[in-house]
Image: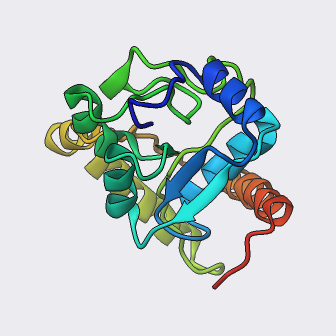
């Protein structure tokens, strides 16, 4: 959030947005990006109306938050940390289900007043449906081994990633289905259309 915005907490931001519907403008990296849908989920859960300002990428969106062209954005923690530390932006919370080790003092949005809010970027490896179980097990083992290596692990953690490996296809499948359903509903309710 731009430091000139009077909101010092998530509750302050919600109150401001309720008092001035549509006047709080947020930047995203473009229509339908994770930044966009994360903000729309926030607006829906908070019961506020925000104005979306799409940019051609996350970097120009963040630049315009810093220079005050827009008031807020939902930015990845690694991208935001240097600007938080320099005072160019004010962070109110993190969107994931847990606090980030890079900014451990920041609450989650769920802790800060929107119980149940959760939005995080994640990466997974998928293979074609009929890939033999032995090949899947081997790939999973290789990825888990690589992610457990101290140099790989430390680099990812320093960059703000949390490492989770799951050996259960069923567990990851349930996670994927839940994510697809959740974000499809946000896109539908927000009226987001592809351009």
Q: What residue occupies the far top of the structure in this picture?
A: 105
> Would residue 1 be found to the left or right of residue 158 on screen?
right
Is residue 77 depicted above or below 143 in this figure? above
- Tell how many labels: 0
Quadrant of the image occupied by residue 66: top left
From the top left corner, tell me how far across and down residue 135 is, in percent: 47, 71
96 over 58 or under it: above or below? above
Question: Is residue 171 something one can see in this rendering?
Answer: no
- Which of 47 and 145 lies nearest the eye of the viewer? 47
Residue 175 on image: x %, y %: 69, 50
Q: Judge left or right: residue 182 versus residue 102.
A: right
In the image, what residue occupies the spot 69% across and 28% down?
14
Q: Is residue 68 above or below residue 3?
A: below
Q: Quadrant of residue 48?
A: top right
Point 45% across, 36% down: residue? 1
Looking at this view, is 55 or 34 the one in front?
55
- As drawn, is 57 to the left or to the right of 88? right
- Residue 157 visible in the snapshot: yes
- In the rendering, at what x and y percent does residue 184 appear? 78, 63
């Amino acid at each position: 959030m731009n430091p000139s915005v009077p909101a010092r907490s998530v509750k302050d931001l919600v109150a401001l947005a309720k008092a001035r519907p549509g006047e709080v403008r947020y930047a995203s990296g473009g229509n339908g990006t994770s930044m966009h849908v994360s903000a729309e989920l926030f607006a829906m859960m908070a019961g506020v109306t925000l104005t979306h300002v799409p940019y051609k990428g996350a970097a120009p969106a963040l630049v315009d938050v810093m220079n005050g062209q827009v008031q807020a954005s939902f930015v990845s923690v690694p991208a935001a940390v240097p600007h938080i530390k320099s005072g160019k932006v004010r962070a109110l919370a993190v969107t994931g289900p847990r606090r980030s080790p890079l900014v451990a003092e920041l609450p989650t949005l769920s802790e800060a007043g929107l119980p149940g809010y959760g939005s995080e970027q994640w990466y997974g490896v998928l293979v074609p449906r009929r890939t033999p179980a032995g090949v899947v097990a081997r790939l999973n083992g290789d990825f888990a081994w690589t992610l457990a290596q101290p140099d790989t692990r430390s680099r990812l953690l320093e960059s703000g990633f949390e490492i989770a490996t799951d050996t259960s296809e069923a567990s990851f499948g349930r996670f994927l289905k839940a994510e697809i359903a959740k974000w499809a509903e946000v896109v539908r309710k927000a009226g987001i259309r592809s351009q």
